Image: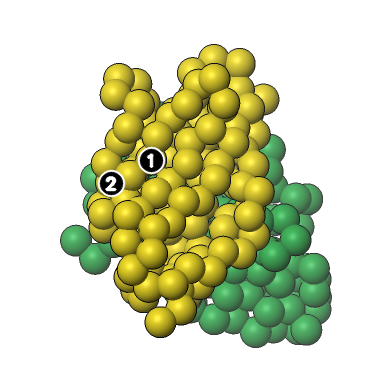
Amino acid sequence: AQSVTQPDIHITVSEGASLELRCNYSYGATPYLFWYVQSPGQGLQLLLKYFSGDTLVQGIKGFEAEFKRSQSSFNLRKPSVHWSDAAEYFCAVYGNKLVFGAGTILRVKS
Amino acid sequence: DAGVIQSPRHEVTEMGQEVTLRCKPISGHNSLFWYRQTMMRGLELLIYFNNNVPIDDSGMPEDRFSAKMPNASFSTLKIQPSEPRDSAVYFCASSLTGTGREKLFFGSGTQLSVL
C-alpha cells in the first residue's frame, strides 16, 4: 500500500521569499505524484503532477516540484511567494489508489 | 463549465437525523469520488463510482453511510442516523476516466455539523 508524509504541519514565510514544502512517499514501484492546493472554504485544486520523464515538473501559479527517487521525495518549490499563496497544500500519491498527505498550512507574512 | 457542484454548502443537524449531501459532477466525467476531511484524519476517500457503478466503498465508515449515483449527473451521500462524530467537510470530486492517475476536480464541499 502507498502512503505519503508531509512532515511540516505549518510553515510561515515572508512575502517574496522562497518556499519549499516537503513530501515523502512510500510505494514499491514508481508512483504517480501530485500536489494540490486548498484555499479556505474551497475544494482542492491540482497544482502539478508527475508520472514519468523529467523529474522536475512545472505547475500552475509558478510552482514546481522535483521527484527524487533515491529520497522518495516530491518536494514543492516556489522561488518567490506571494500573499495569495497562503493556503493548505496536499501531496498525494497514486499506487493502486490515490492517497493524500495530511497537508501543510502555508502562512505568508508581509 | 460550472465545475463540480455540491449542495448544501453548510448543514447543521441534530444527532439521529438523516442527512443527504448532493453532488453534480462535471459533464462528461465518468468518475465521481466522495471524500471526507477532518482535522484528525485528514482527507479520506469514502467511495468512488465509475460510470455510475460503485467501484470501491471500502472507505465508507459504517452502515449508516450510503451513496448512490442514479445517473451520470447526480450523486448523493446519505448518513442515517447522523452522529456528532460525522461532523466534517465532505467533498465530491470528478474526473474523466477515474484511473486515479489523472486530475481530480473538487467541489467546494459541504460543511456538516451534527449537534
* Quarter of the image with the C terminus of chain B in it: bottom right
Question: Pointer 2: what residue?
Answer: A59
**Quick one: which chain is green?**
B
Q: Residue furthest left?
A: B1
Nearer the observer, B107 or B42: B42
Residue A31: x and y, percent?
Answer: 49, 24
User: Image quadrant of residue A49?
Assistant: top left
- Which residue is depicted at the point 80% across and 78% down? B15
Task: Answer above or below: position of B10 versus A53.
Answer: below
Nearer the observer, A91 or A7: A7
Asked if residue A41 lies left or right of residue A50, the reply is: right
- Which residue is depicted at the point 24% across and 66% down? B2
Amino acid tagged 2: Gly
Which numbered tag is attached to residue B36? none
**Quick one: which chain is yellow?**
A
Amino acid tagged 1: Ala
Q: CA distance from mark 1 to mark 2?
A: 8 Å
Label 1 SS: strand
Is residue B89 at least partly visible in the picture? yes
Residue B100: x and y, percent?
Answer: 44, 33
Which numbered tag is attached to residue A65? 1
Q: Residues within 10 Å of mark 1 (few under 14, many from 20)?
A: many
Q: Residues within 10 Å of mark 2 (few under 14, many from 20)?
A: some
